[in-house]
């Protein structure tokens, strides 16, 4: 589920006029997130206890249900599921080396709401642009403090100010859909994963000239190490039209390249390499308390085995440029209402609900 990260309220000076350029669409961006589930599922079936214990202790968790209480949308049906997946851009640890900007804390760099209807044989992933202005409901922060409600705040700032529970509550308020599970992946964890693979090859259709992040690549195929890969998924101003909406496609391309490299190398048939990659994946993983062990993750992953990734539908939440600030977007009506209603009722999403005015109607 982003690159120089802006502080909440900071404007993208010099790029307002260029954001209308239509970004390329990419399918199945959520699959890289479920990579951790796949690896864990395979590993958990036949390894020694110490092996299991090491990976199990890597996973961090947060008790979303306790933090949010009962003031939430109703649960889906007996087997339907809704999963909120965040890609965090924390500047701690390895992420501190991404660029020269003086930005602290963390934000939700990528956000995907994955809806899995009754029967769990198909799924829809909705990407929520980080620059979307939303109404943040009152919530309890990770430190136990009360954060008052606020209007017209940037979506990615909710994570930095309130933490995971506040993001979940914001998405539930926005969509009217209850999130059954939460998963967060720190992008820094992918540096070790990429290096464990010996690098990842990616083909760019446009050059990257990011003076802030220090990444300069011509159009064409490149084999990137972990540090370069982190800069790639974070780059913004040096690629394409410089917009957040355009950057989503670049991130999706990279994550699919990671999966292609794993398949190419036959990693799943090499216990030593598999362990090294699984260790990197779990070290960067935070889940809700219901998924915070290898056994629960494996069970959850097994329940999704009927879903074919190639048939999954991926859409971006319809947005349009804000009339007061052209560097920000807001939910586009009536498209957004139609989208959430279709997901709440397990109906097919109408084509009109997939059109986003900010990307030229597609």
Image (tube, rainbow, N blue to C red):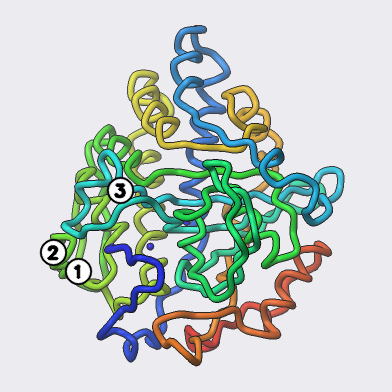
Q: CA distance from mark 3 to mark 1?
A: 22 Å
Q: Is residue 17 above or below residue 61?
A: below
- Residue placed at 33% from the left, 78% from the top? 11
Secondary structure of the residue carrying tag 2 is strand
- Mark 3 is surrounded, within 10 Å at the Cα level, by few (under 14), some (14 to 19) or many (20 or more) other residues, namely many
Quarter of the image holding residue 273? top left
Q: Is 126 located above or below residue 195 in the figure? A: below
Q: Return the x and y of residue 247 as percentages of the image width and height.
A: 36, 68
**Tag on residue 216?**
2
Q: What residue sits right under mark 3 in the picture?
A: 91
Q: Earlier in the sequence, mark 3 or mark 2?
A: 3
Q: In the drawing, does residue 57 fall left or right of residue 217?
A: right
Do the residues bearing badges 1 and 2 touch, measured as CB atoms within 8 Å? yes
Rendered residue at 62%/22% (across/down):
295
Mark 2, other Cα within 10 Å: few <14 / some 14–19 / many ≥20 = some
The residue under the point 34% across, 19% down is 272
Query: Residue 167 appears in which quarter of the rendering?
Result: bottom right
Q: Is residue 265 left or right of residue 63?
A: left
User: Which is more N-terminal, label 1 or label 3?
Assistant: 3
Total marks shown come to 3
Per the model, the C-alpha gap separating discs 3 and 2 is 21 Å
User: Which numbered dot is residue 4?
Assistant: none
Sequence order check, earlier mark of 1 and 2: 1
Residue under pointer 1: 208
């Amino acid at each position: 589920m982003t690159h120089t990260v802006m502080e909440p309220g900071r404007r993208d000076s010099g790029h307002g006029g260029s954001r209308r350029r239509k970004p390329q669409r990419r399918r199945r961006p959520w699959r890289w997130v479920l990579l951790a589930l796949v690896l864990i599922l395979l590993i958990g079936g036949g390894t020694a206890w110490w092996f299991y214990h090491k990976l199990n202790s890597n996973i961090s968790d947060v008790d979303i249900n306790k933090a949010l209480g009962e003031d939430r949308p109703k649960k889906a049906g007996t087997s339907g599921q809704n999963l909120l997946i965040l890609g965090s851009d924390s500047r701690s640890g390895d992420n501190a080396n991404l660029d020269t900007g003086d930005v602290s804390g963390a934000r939700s760099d990528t956000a995907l709401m994955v809806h899995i209807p009754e029967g769990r044989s198909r799924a829809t992933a909705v990407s929520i642009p980080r620059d979307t202005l939303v109404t943040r409901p009152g919530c309890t922060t990770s430190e136990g403090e009360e954060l008052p409600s606020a209007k017209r705040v940037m979506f990615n700032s909710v994570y930095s100010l309130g933490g995971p529970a506040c993001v979940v509550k914001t998405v539930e308020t926005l969509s009217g859909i209850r999130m059954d599970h939460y998963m967060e992946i720190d992008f820094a964890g992918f540096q070790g994963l990429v290096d464990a693979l010996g690098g990842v090859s990616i083909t760019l259709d446009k050059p990257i000239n990011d003076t802030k992040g220090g990444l300069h690549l011509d159009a064409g195929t490149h084999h990137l190490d972990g540090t370069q890969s982190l800069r790639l998924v974070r780059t913004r101003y040096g690629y394409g039209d410089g917009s957040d909406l355009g950057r989503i496609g670049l991130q999706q391309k990279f994550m699919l390249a990671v999966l292609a490299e794993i398949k190419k190398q036959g990693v799943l048939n090499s216990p030593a390499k598999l362990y090294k990659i699984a260790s990197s994946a779990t070290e960067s993983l935070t889940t809700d308390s219901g998924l915070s062990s290898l056994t629960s993750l494996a069970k959850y992953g097994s329940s999704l085995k009927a879903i074919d990734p190639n048939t999954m539908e991926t859409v971006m939440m319809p947005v349009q440029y804000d009339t007061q600030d052209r560097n920000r977007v807001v939910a586009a009506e009536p498209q957004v209402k139609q989208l959430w209603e279709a997901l709440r009722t397990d109906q097919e999403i109408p084509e009109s609900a997939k059109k986003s005015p900010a990307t030229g109607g597609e």
